[in-house]
Image (cartoon, grey):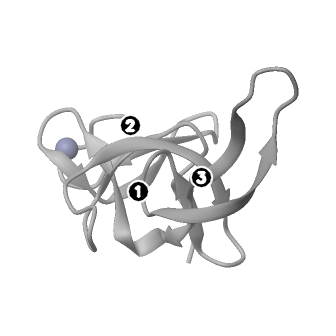
Amino acid sequence: MSVKIRKGDEVEIISGKDLGARARVLEVNPKKGRVLVEGINQVTRHEPLRMSKGRGGTEGGIIHKEASIDISNVALICPTHGPTRAGYQIEGDGSKTRVCTKCGTEL
Ligand SMILES: [Zn+2]
């Protein structure tokens, strides 16, 4: 299976608790078939509290961080009709253009 989603793409979540959300891809792991999407699948980590000098306050505490999700749970967004499957179209010079498989719009 070839991975057509790239870092920086805007994708829509098509499965899970963040269904319907749109966000940017931060990282792609083609070997594991996982993607990290900005603000999606956030996990909460409790960091140890540290005393900050001079301000009398504390730093640390609860940190929200994204966890990767399966690449099959996200879809590229076609400007014409929303979440879609992407394919490649081979140009005359041999280069590949990523397109929507439904309508051929370049993605
Ligand atoms: Zn389309």
Quadrant location, ligand no. 1: top left
- Judging depth in this view, the residue of 65 and 35 nearest the camera is 65
Q: Which of marks 3 and 2 is nearer the N terminus?
A: 3
Could you say whether the residue bearing mark 2 is in a helix, strand or loop?
loop
Q: Which of marks 2 and 1 is in front?
A: 2
Label whose residue precedes the other's in the sequence (1 or 3): 3
Neighbours of disc 2 within 10 Å: few (<14), some (14-19), many (20+): some
**Residue name at image x 61 percent, y 44 percent:** 7
Q: Quadrant of the N terminus?
A: bottom right
**Residue 103 visible here:** no
The residue located at (61%, 64%) in the rendering is: 45
Q: Which is more toward the observer, 42 or 74?
A: 42
The image shows residue 3 at horizontal and vertical percentages of 56, 64
User: Relative to residue 62, is residue 95 depicted above or below?
Assistant: above
- What separation in Å lies between label 2 and label 1 (alpha carbons)? 9 Å
Tell me the tag on residue 107. 2
The amino acid type of the residue labelled 1 equals: Gly
The residue beneath circle 3 is 63
Which residue is the extreme one toward the left?
A: 81
Please, what is the three-letter code of the amino acid marked with disc 2? Leu
For the C terminus, the image quarter is top left
On the question of residue 5 being in view, the answer is yes
Q: Is mark 1 on a helix, strand or loop?
A: strand
Give the CA separation, mark 1 to mark 3. Answer: 37 Å
Tag on residue 87?
Answer: 1
In this view, the residue in front, 67 or 82, is: 67
Q: Position of residue 77 (x, y in %)?
A: 28, 44
User: Which amino acid lies under the numbered mark 3 shown in the image of this protein?
Assistant: Ile
